[in-house]
Image: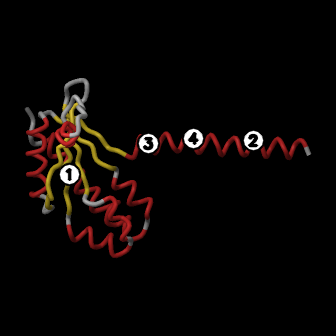
């Protein structure tokens, strides 16, 4: 009986350790971040151009720093979100799972860090889409992820300071 109990404890411990490692890995993979060679306004302007060139639309930007300041909270850094959408892709996803609207529109966040550098972050739509499977994997895990990567890659590849 002790051997069976020991195996059961070892199995449970292995599951706990595996789950803990998965949480750590998922946290690191959930958001993709890259450094921009430009300041926040220039990065936003270039991204808006890339969004339009890629055939996407941008419903707008949201200056989180300014919004927080209006409520008496200072971030101490610039933080602005750029929304982007491609209606064709949104329809394909929402036809399958309307609850995915919680992740729409897609967002690029442009901000500064304590090092004074500008960064761009986005959700890892490729990973999230693949986790959902089916049509959502094709759209988010494929088309959307590739197009977002191209938009961000062109920011550093074609617009250097």
Which residue is at the front of the view, 160 or 41? 41
Q: Nearer the viewer, mark 1 or mark 4?
A: 4
Location of residue 18 in the rendering, given as x and y in whole percent from the top left corner:
60, 43
Location of residue 17 in the rendering, given as x and y in whole percent from the top left corner:
62, 40
Q: CA distance from mark 1 to mark 4?
A: 33 Å
User: Residue at 18% across / 48% down in the picture?
Assistant: 62
Query: Which residue lies under the disc numbered 4?
Result: 20
Number of the label disc, if any, that sits on residue 150: 1
Query: Which residue lies under the disc numbered 2?
Result: 10
Q: CA distance from mark 3 to mark 2?
A: 26 Å
Circle 4 sits in a helix, a strand or a loop, which is it? helix
Number of the label disc, if any, that sits on residue 27: 3
Earlier sequence position, callout 1 versus callout 2 = 2
Location of residue 99 in the rendering, given as x and y in whole percent from the top left corner:
38, 67
Q: CA distance from mark 4 to mark 2?
A: 15 Å
Which residue is at the front of the view, 91 or 150? 91
């Amino acid at each position: 009986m002790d051997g069976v109990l020991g195996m059961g404890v070892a199995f449970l411990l292995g599951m706990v350790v595996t789950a803990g490692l998965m949480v750590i890995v998922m946290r690191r993979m959930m958001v993709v971040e890259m450094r921009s060679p430009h300041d926040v306004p220039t990065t936003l302007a270039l991204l808006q151009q890339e969004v339009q060139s890629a055939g996407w639309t941008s419903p707008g930007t949201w200056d989180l720093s300014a919004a927080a300041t209006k409520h008496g909270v200072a971030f101490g850094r610039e933080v602005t979100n750029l929304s982007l959408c491609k209606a064709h892709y949104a329809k394909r996803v929402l036809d399958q799972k309307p609850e995915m609207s919680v992740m729409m529109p897609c967002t690029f966040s442009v901000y500064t860090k304590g090092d004074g550098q500008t960064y761009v972050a986005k959700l890892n739509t490729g990973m999230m889409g693949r986790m959902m499977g089916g049509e959502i994997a094709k759209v988010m895990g494929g088309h959307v992820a590739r197009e977002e990567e191209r938009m961000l890659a062109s920011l550093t590849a074609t617009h250097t300071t």
